[in-house]
Amino acid sequence: MDGAAVRLKTNSVEDVDEPRLTVSGAARRIGVAPGTLRTWDRRYGLGPTGHAHGRHRRYSAVDMARLELMQHALVQGASPAEAARYARSALPADGDAPAPPAPARPEIGPVSVEYTGGGPVPVPPDPDERPVRGGGATLRMPGAGPRARGLGRAALAMDPVTVRQLLEASIATDGLVGTWEDVARPVLVAVGQRWATSGSGVEVEHLLSEVLIAVFGARAASGLTAGSARPVLLAGMPSELHVVPLAVLAALLAEYGIACRSLGPALPATALAAAVRRTAPAAVVLWSQLEPTADVAVVAALPVTRPRFRTYVAGPGWDGAALPAGVSRLASLTEAAERIGATVLH
């Protein structure tokens, strides 16, 4: 609901026709846990108003508008305390003036993470934001910036529209590599740690991965031109299911004017060989996230074509692997784009 369109009611008699939601109903509407709404009520005073003694607490339309402003500010990177102050100021508890329109991003002050040659400087945690190990409504991302925190909240809320909007805004401001390294990857790592400690959150990882592939894939497709030179094949190893970084690489290569054929996760070795023969690629990049999926035999068995292609492997799964002669390891996205660009364009 648009906060600008809400007026506070001043009638002495409650409008009995106004729909009101229970805590669980309001939580479903906002996309948070009921316990989160109770916390917002207890800590920040963003609970149901107009509660009559002896009746269950229910959220009015104005209460819901205030919660939506709070959630909007959170996914834009504000801390809970800052988001609550914004929601209360935009829709005060008393008065009858229309609320001002929500800004594109709440004013949350300077980013509290400083980057130096030695990496991120530790920052004391916000006392109002208490992440729960393994579960709860927040993710543990020490040192993460506002964009990453906002993306994490949107992902936990299972809100693909906001996830996409945040990613596209970050790409416009910080570029492809900055968005991946500083915004998206910290959230994926935190979701993975959450799953490892609690066994929950796989659905969050799947939703975030799908949106990431769609956003970066659209960038890759927009950079392609008809009659492009020999393509670069990008594929996950036969048992590898996590290939989001390949979508980022495809988008980055598109900026160089290099066409890619992305073959997705868990590509069988026979299908990989067939794709190499049919496309005569300039280069092949094989991704492995985990060591068990880094099968050197698959790399060694790639067919020989004319003209020949360069073979690269990428991902942490290849750490320490003894690679066949002529196979190169790519250590980062930037290095991958530069080396593949040199291979294809020169």
Image (cartoon, grey):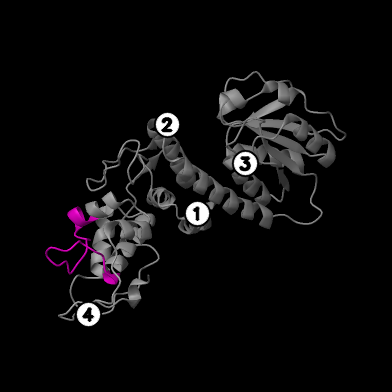
Look at the picture and state if 341 lies above or below 12.
above
Q: Earlier in the sequence, mark 3 or mark 4?
A: 4
Q: Quadrant of residue 130?
A: top left
* Residue picked out by circle 3: 246
Q: Quadrant of residue 195?
A: top left
Q: Earlier in the sequence, mark 2 or mark 4?
A: 4
Rendering coords of residue 319 (x, y %)? 57, 23
Q: Earlier in the sequence, mark 1 or mark 3?
A: 1
The amino acid marked with disc number 2 is Ala
**Closest to the observer: 96 or 233?**
96
One can see residue 31 in this view: yes
- Measure the alpha-carbon separation of dots 1 and 4: 36 Å
Rendering coords of residue 271 (x, y %)? 76, 35
**Closest to the observer: 255 or 74?**
74
Q: Earlier in the sequence, mark 1 or mark 2?
A: 1
Give the residues drawn in magenta, as a range. Answer: 40-62
* Residue picked out by circle 1: 167
- Left or right of 110, for residue 161: right
The amino acid marked with disc number 1 is Leu
Residue 102 among magenta residues: no
Label at residue 96: 4
